[in-house]
Image (tube, rainbow, N blue to C red):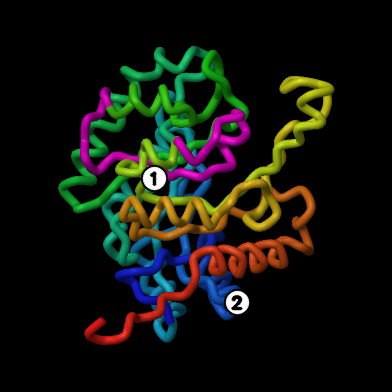
Amino acid sequence: MIHPEHDIRIGTLAGQGSRTPEYISQILPHGFESFQINFWQTLGDVDLEKLAPEIDTVLNDSNAVISSLGIFGNPLETDEDAESTRRGWEACIAHAHLFGTDLVCGFAGRIRNVPVPESMERYREVFEPLAERAAAKGVRIAFENCPMNGSWERGDWNIAFNPMAWDMMFDAVDAGNVGLEWEPCHQMSQLIDPIPQLKKYMPKIFHVHGKDATIHHDVLAEYGAFGPKPVVEHRHPGFGDSNWTNIISELRRGGYKGTIDIEGWHDPVYQQELEMTGQVHALHYLKGCRGNYVANPKGF
């Protein structure tokens, strides 16, 4: 059994809409210790007030927890999808406590196909009131660091992928309850060394996604970053280049008490019928990097 005061929980994403309780019940015996309940763009037909007790029933006899709610869309645009995403943020903030969590995660959004700085005013307009709403509920907001194939100059989904953008965002909405949902994979895909970044932004890291990457240096040397072959592939932890023992050490050094939730469904090898094989391998690998809490002898 993990010790919540000393251990970082290792879990996974469980975004299966109204079938999320059934999904969790099937994978819980593998040993996952936490779950992020995530949604794509909209909550759809999910009633959070109904979903929460159903999930609580599934977790009742376990030591597992819900780490966070996630709503992943583009809330900065003005179309119907963006409005649905904004309503999703509001609903997740209002109902997070029903799931026993104080954390809501997602993309920061982006005004499409303009440079990152041109989204900052709209970002402030949307997330300053959301941050205030969240603070009143005792909720934190964390932005995933995924480029979603965007760049500094153009993109469709998310400005929160680069450290310079983070600095601009934290200046635009200067709130203690606004931070990052970080993972090394998305930084490695930009050829950024994740460890120095982890150390620098540790106070703003509220949640960690367990996803790794492999950088193919031979492809980079021969074809470059924008050639015909992929330079970086997303991997489950344990199959990529990151040293998660070092990552977890830095998280502990920085006082991190949250979870590492595996973000699956991206590995080019452990996918489809091998998806859960890869996720469970990642679960055991991350637990090995973390170690299991052992109490010191009393009085020593």
- Which residue was labeled with disc 2? 30
- Distance from the alpha carbon under mark 1 to that under mark 2: 30 Å
Residue 92 in view (yes/no)? no
Q: Of 74 and 278, which appears nearest the observer?
A: 278
- Mark 1 or mark 2, which has the lower sequence index? 2
Residue 195 lies in the magenta stretch: yes
Q: As drawn, is 231 to the left or to the right of 152?
A: right
Please state the extent of the stretch shown in magenta in the rendering: 171-196
Three-letter amino acid code of the residue under disc 2: His
Residue 160 at x, y = what percent? 44, 31
What kind of element bears circle 1? helix
Q: Of 92 and 171, which appears nearest the observer?
A: 171
The label shown at residue 149 is none
Rendered residue at 45%/20% (across/down): 111
Rendered residue at 24%/43% (across/down): 177
Three-letter amino acid code of the residue under disc 1: Gly
- Which residue was labeled with disc 1? 88
Image quadrant containing the N terminus = bottom left
Q: Of 13 and 79, which appears nearest the observer?
A: 13
What kind of element bears circle 2? helix
Residue 14 at x, y = what percent? 53, 61
Residue 230 at x, y = what percent? 77, 32
